Amino acid sequence: MNDIVVENLSFAYEGTDRLILDGISMHINEGDFVCLLGQSGCGKSTFLRLLAGLEHATSGSIKMDGEEIKGADLNRSVVFQDYGLFPWKTAGDNILLALRQRYPQRSKKELREVAIDMLQQVGLNADVYKKYPKELSGGMQQRCAIARSFSMDPPVLLMDEPFGALDAVTRARLQDMLLSLWNNESEKKTVFFVTHDVEEALLLASRIFVFGQSPSHIIFERTIDPADRSTRETLYKSTKVAELREALIANINQDVMSRMD
């Protein structure tokens, strides 16, 4: 089991006394799709970096399968908002770079087949393999970044506002693509998805955590019953989704107002 347990996690950058995160605790089950929701600057991305092992907690701990996370490893892959593709490498070579780390014993031919298959799974043509990032639209680059992460087959996928810079139509298509990939996995990946968009969280999440403003703590959380999960068709029709939307917005607004008083 790849459960992730966060216990009383606090974080401040080295050399400062100002806490960014203060007493974060959660128990995430393997296969959960977790949306981390909150205003810009509330520490969501910092929390993701701690999950990735790119930062270290000031106090408290994060454990995966009972082992404390002490650094980056191949069990957790990150998709960034700015795609994270090396501009001097083709889309295929960007994916191969990750695959060689994951599967050093496999031949280049095998890994190339994996990369092309994954590109096609995210809705791109095989010829994208030979194209450079500058030749691709933002949505295509983000599909390549997602293909790279899924091709490594990590049990945990960390996504930092990956669709925030995209137009509405491309964003909707990639949201649906991500859900399809996640749902079709024989063993669902655990996904942590940072967003400040309530509608995006309602559409994607099986669990939602709302972070308050810095020093951030969890001000609201909800586990969504599988039968009550929204689809694009029910997002604005379901009474239960409407109630959750109101609760999310109310908690975020209350937190904002409390800091203005």
Image (cartoon, rainbow, N blue to C red):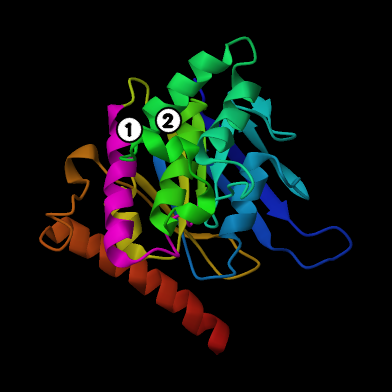
Horizontal side, residue 143 vs residue 156: left or right: left
Horizontal side, residue 203 vs residue 45: left or right: left
State the image coordinates of residue 3 (x, y, percent, origin top left).
Answer: 51, 28
**Amino acid on which disc 2 is placed:** Lys
**Residue at 77% in and 68% down:** 18
Picture quadrant of residue 120: top left
State the image coordinates of residue 224 (x, y, percent, origin top left).
Answer: 29, 45
Residue 62: say if magenta: no
**Residue at 67% in and 46% down:** 50
The numbered mark at residue 121 is 1
Quarter the C terminus occupies: bottom right
Horizontal side, residue 229 vs residue 54: left or right: left
Question: Badge 2: how crowded within 10 Å, few (<14), some, or many (20+)?
Answer: many
Query: Total of numbered circles in the picture?
Result: 2
| Residue 32 seen in the current view | no
Horizontal side, residue 156 vs residue 52: left or right: left
**Residue at 67% in and 29% down:** 73
| Residue 88 seen in the current view | yes
Question: Badge 1: how crowded within 10 Å, few (<14), some, or many (20+)?
Answer: some
**Amino acid on which disc 1 is placed:** Gln
Label 2: element kind: loop
Please, which residue is most extreme toward the right here? 15
Query: Residues in magenta?
Result: 160-184
State the image coordinates of residue 254 (x, y, percent, origin top left).
Answer: 43, 77
- Which of these two is toward me, 194 or 151? 151
Which label's residue is closer to the chain start, 1 or 2?
1
Query: Looking at the image, is 79 positioned above or below residue 94?
Result: below
Q: CA distance from mark 1 to mark 2?
A: 16 Å
